[in-house]
Amino acid sequence: MDGDLYVFCQSVDVNGHVTGDVIGFAQSIRVNGPVDGNVRVGCNNVTLSGTTGKNVLAFGDSIRMDSDAKAGGSATVFGGTISIDGTLGRDILSYGHLVSITGAVGGSVKAHGDTLSIGSTAKIDGATVFEGRNHPR
């Protein structure tokens, strides 16, 4: 798609190339294809599996960045369960019940919530700051 993609629906899979931004509100959004701009979504379930050229802004109950997903910029995420298994070029700012990082972060991590879990495969280039109820794991 040439330009921005706006979606307001129950469920959508974005499989093609979007040269602009993806902006969506739905129960479920899965972005599989490449996005040259930003991904800005608010929904119950968000799954990123493709490449995002710039930043990710997501609000949802479940937010997942698969291991194949890449974002060139930062991620700002608000959710219940947040899983970062892919690669981010810059920082993460998260507010969530459970934040799990097993992928690569090219900047810092600032997390707020109940639990922060950093897996043995995670690579974080900057500082990690966590404010929450439980000690980070």
Image: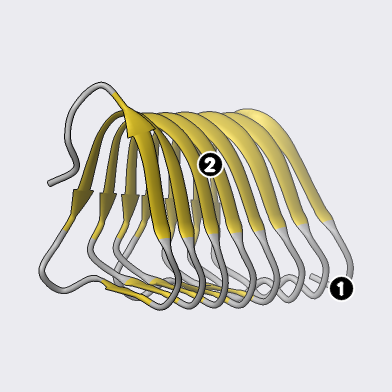
Q: Is residue 79 above or below residue 66?
A: above
Q: Is residue 107 above or below residue 46?
A: below
Q: What's the residue type where badge 2 is placed?
A: Val
Q: Is residue 68 above or below residue 22?
A: below
* Residue highlighted by disc 2: 77
Which type of secondary structure does the marked residue at label 2 adopt?
Answer: strand
Which type of secondary structure does the marked residue at label 1 adopt?
Answer: loop
Residue 119 as seen in the image, left or right of residue 122: left
Q: Residue at x 41, y 78 (%)?
A: 125
The N terminus appears in which quarter of the rendering? bottom right
Q: Nearer the viewer, mark 1 or mark 2?
A: 2
Sequence-wise, the earlier of marks 1 and 2 is 1
| Residue count near mark 2 (Cα–Cα under 10 Å), binned few <14, some 14–19, many ≥20 | many
Residue 32 as seen in the image, left or right of residue 66: right
Residue 50 or residue 16, whichever sits in front: 50
Q: Position of residue 44 (x, y in %)?
A: 46, 26
Q: Position of residue 104 (x, y in %)?
A: 35, 75
Q: Is residue 55 above or below residue 34?
A: above
Q: Residue at x 23, y 64 (%)?
A: 102
CA gap, disc 1 and disc 2? 26 Å
* Residue highlighted by disc 1: 2
Q: Position of residue 124 (x, y in %)?
A: 35, 72
